[in-house]
Amino acid sequence: MPSRISLTQFFIDEQRADRIPTDLRLLLETVARATAAIATTVSKGALADALGEAGTENVQGEAQKKLDVIANEILLGANVCDGNLAAMASEELETIYPIPTGYPRGNYLLLFDPLDGSSNIDVNVTIGTIFSVLRSPRAKDEELTEADFLQPGRGQVAAGYVTYGPSTQLVLTVGNGVHGFTLDREMGGFIQTHPFMTIPAETREYAINASNARYWEAPVQRYIAELQQGKDGSRGSDFNMRWIASMVADVHRVLTRGGIFMYPLDEKCRAKGGKLRLMYEANPMAMLVEQAGGAATTGRERILDIVPERLHQRVPVILGSSDEVERVTSYHLEPSS
Ligand code: AHG
């Protein structure tokens, strides 16, 4: 067995190398502990009465599952009193959640999708938590507003996700590569198992919900048609398709062995701007993918350069192996598109 380091040791090493300040390290350790608690509930499933509908709707008008609500409460509860945050925002909350008066406030904003892949909860397929950390632009005694969160993704100081699958894995970046950790339930902590994850520039694997094909724009129709023609078409090579329908699991596959993941603009989601949320889904995944050597665009612009207009803004997402992302982006940018 190779010698492995714990998440805490990893953070201490990053701190000693001046790549992460103490308060950010403590904040990320709190997030990691919260996800380990979510993992325990996820793994108990029906035994913890954690499956099924919550009977409520979130701000997006989506029916909440019990686990959406449980995961959201665990993350809020774990982070409210650690003193490193100024405020939080969640897919499951209508507006921002400033750290209440009476608790110490810190220098960061934490955004999260507490439980990504909700449609997979009840069928025991991999789901996850996605998170993003921004600097707070306010002094600790100043009140925060939603506008303080509307920073381009290139300003993120950390981003990550946790997959609740056959094993629980935490994948994160603090701007010095992408590192994967596996939860050791007996030891009670995350252990580094995947240092410096990289995405190869080339791939022969793609992920898209093909049931939306008739709604796609022409550049996406063209790109996917070329992949489907395989070695008989202009690409001269066969491509394989995978679609888990949990972004967190599909992106984890891309980070593990390469690939391109797409939830493009289509006629079904055009009015909303896209399907996936910019600030707590697309931005953290884009930072991870770029840190791993890949690319992430909307088809028309780099995701990390978008200036957000709303907390729950949606965007098209095309990310993964850089050769393929650049190709499909170039199709969007052709004058006829
Ligand atoms: P959420 O569970 O947070 O609502 O988001 C699910 C997202 C994402 O995880 C996945 O890639 C996509 O929705 C799946 O969409 P389809 O149902 O259209 O396949």
Image (cartoon, helix red, strand yellow):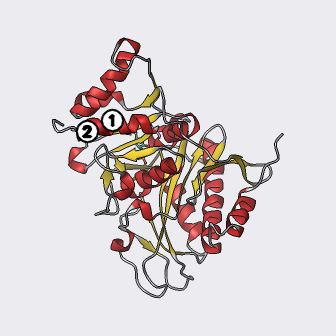
Considering every residue shown, the one lying at the far left of the view is 336
Residue 52 position within the rendered picture, expressed as x and y whole percent measured from the top left: 49, 43
As helix, strand or loop, the secondary structure at mark 1 comes to: helix
Q: Residue at x 41, y 46 (%)?
A: 296
Do callouts 2 and 1 mark residues in contact (Cβ within 8 Å)? yes
Tell me the kind of residue under disc 1: Val
Say if 178 sits above or below 29 in the image: above
Res 194 → quadrant: top right
Above or below: residue 261 compared with residue 8: above
Q: Is residue 55 visible?
A: no
Q: Residue furthest bottom?
A: 141
Residue 79 location (% of width, % of height): 57, 69
Tell me if residue 241 comes above or below residue 325 in the rendering: above
Which quadrant holds residue 46?
Answer: top right
Q: How many marks?
A: 2
Q: How many residues crowd around disc 2 within 10 Å: few (fewer than 14), some, or many (20 or more)?
A: many
Residue 332 is tagged as 2
Above or below: residue 241 compared with residue 58: above
Residue indicated by mark 1: 328
**Residue 30 percent across, percent down from the top left:** 63, 65
What whole-number distance in Å separates the C-alpha atoms at marks 2 and 1? 7 Å
Q: Quadrant of the C terminus?
A: top left
Q: Position of residue 216 (x, y in %)?
A: 25, 33
Q: Amino acid at mark 2?
A: His
